[in-house]
Image (cartoon, rainbow, N blue to C red):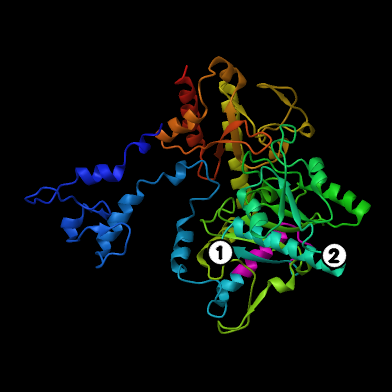
Amino acid sequence: MPLAKHVKPDDILKQSRDHVTHSHGLTKSDPSQTQSGYAARYGTAPVPKYKIPSTGTDANATYQLIHDELSLDGSPLLNLASFVHTWMPKEADQLMIENMSKNLIDQDEYPMTQIIHTRCISMLADLWHAPSVHSAVGTATTGSSEAIQLGGLAMKRIWQEKRKAAGKSIHEPGPNIVMGANAQVALEKFARYFEVECRLVPISVESKYRLDPKKAMDYVDENTIGVFVILGSTYTGHYEPVKEMSDLLDEYEAKTGHFVPIHVDGASGAFVAPFANPKLPWDFSLPRVVSINTSGHKFGLAYVGVGWVVWRDKAHLPKDLIFELHYLGSVEYSFSLNFSRPAAPIIAQYFNLIHLGFKGYRDVALNDLKNARLLSRALERSGYYTVLSDIHRQVPSAGGVLEGAKKIAGIDETNVESYEPGLPVVAFRFSDDFKAKYPDVQQKWIQTLLRAKGWIVPNYELAPGLDQVEILRVVVRENMTESLIDRLVTDLVRNAVFYL
């Protein structure tokens, strides 16, 4: 049982502080206040924790107090649980500092910022093969969560308009949306928040822990507003087969006359696949893909706070969802769940697009995938772990396969096209041999032991259908260098050996 259920830290601290001397000796210090170690130096009083202080505190003391408290957070560099990018060049830092006070929504006051915003949308539309960059529309969002809500809302509204035009009810039985059970919570949030039935397709080992397009068709009907297809599963990093899903929906439309669109959740993959696997069909090159979202603050390599959603053309973004504003000095248009939002992350995204270019993004993506392959192979060769992600496995069309550690045919192991496409994510678990020999060892203990070393590596259950399987997961980001991979493998193997 957790010790926290028996021990209250606030009570311990309250009892352990120096007490003001009183004759009755019963007065105790207040645990709702922070006793700063810098109080004597700066002449500050204790700072209340849960209410605004009656008087302010010196700026230096305030900085030092908050700085020291935040030092208890984990290191972003060692946070291998997160997809969120944590480093940018100092020039990008400077740009963000210079523009941190700008509000993106105020287009009249900050016209150049709005132009940069539009340029980013055009660049993404071109990257994702929109039929016409001039016809594509989009917007920056706080992240992929907001972008997914907007993409789903547009599909729902178009479905409603079609139903009304056909004289059919939009309430009985109501709209539904289809997605794999491995969908990130933001996709399920859309369904719940906007009153759309969420139809989750169970995953399996055969479907590679992701949406199975053939099974998904069992959930599609005339009230399906669309299918969410994920380019990069949060669980294992697998790309869902957008082209296969599109082909099956083409067949369905030919038989029934019902058009079911696809929204691609490219939160991570939409900034990886175009660079690492430019021949992979998943984007607007497929006519059924009507909208795509991504997170600029993931593999877009910007700081947290920026996402994007782009529609292939204006026909797939209903006009009545776009608001016309007149009270900021000019006529402006808005389609978002938020209103005010910082402009600095958008400027940071533009910096990356210009600074890195296609080649720079490709180099980063290929290096991330190379390091992820290194980690995957090392874990499997240890004998202690089985890797569920497939980015280190060769595809048959590459001219051969690997059997264990032995190469059967000549393959260029540095060529990304030789491998299964996917995110630079390594999902793994204890091997069956290890579990058979040491059945009492719990996999979640690895997460705890790694945390003692500073690593943050999550251990969690797979999605419904395989939720009896626990996995550990490492997201290999740009700052996850080969030297860090070496240390991580050492700690993972030593932690497993710890139990032997």
The residue under label 1 is 346
Residue shown at the point (57%, 67%) measured from the top left: 338
Q: Amino acid at mark 1?
A: Ile
State the CA–CA distance, disc 1 to disc 2: 42 Å
Residue 332 is left or right of residue 249, and the answer is: left
Quarter holding the N terminus is top left
Q: Quadrant of residue 222?
A: bottom right
Dominant SS in magenta: helix
Residue 425 percent location from the top left of the image: 60, 39
Report whether residue 132 is seen.
Answer: no
* Magenta-colored span: 117-133
Task: Name the residue tied to disc 2.
Answer: 168
Is residue 60 in view? yes
> Which marked residue is nearer to the observer: mark 1 or mark 2?
2
Q: Foreground residue, 101 or 276?
A: 101
Q: In the rendering, at what x and y percent does residue 346 appear?
A: 56, 64
Outermost residue, front side: 24
Up-down relation of residue 165 to residue 10 (above or below): below
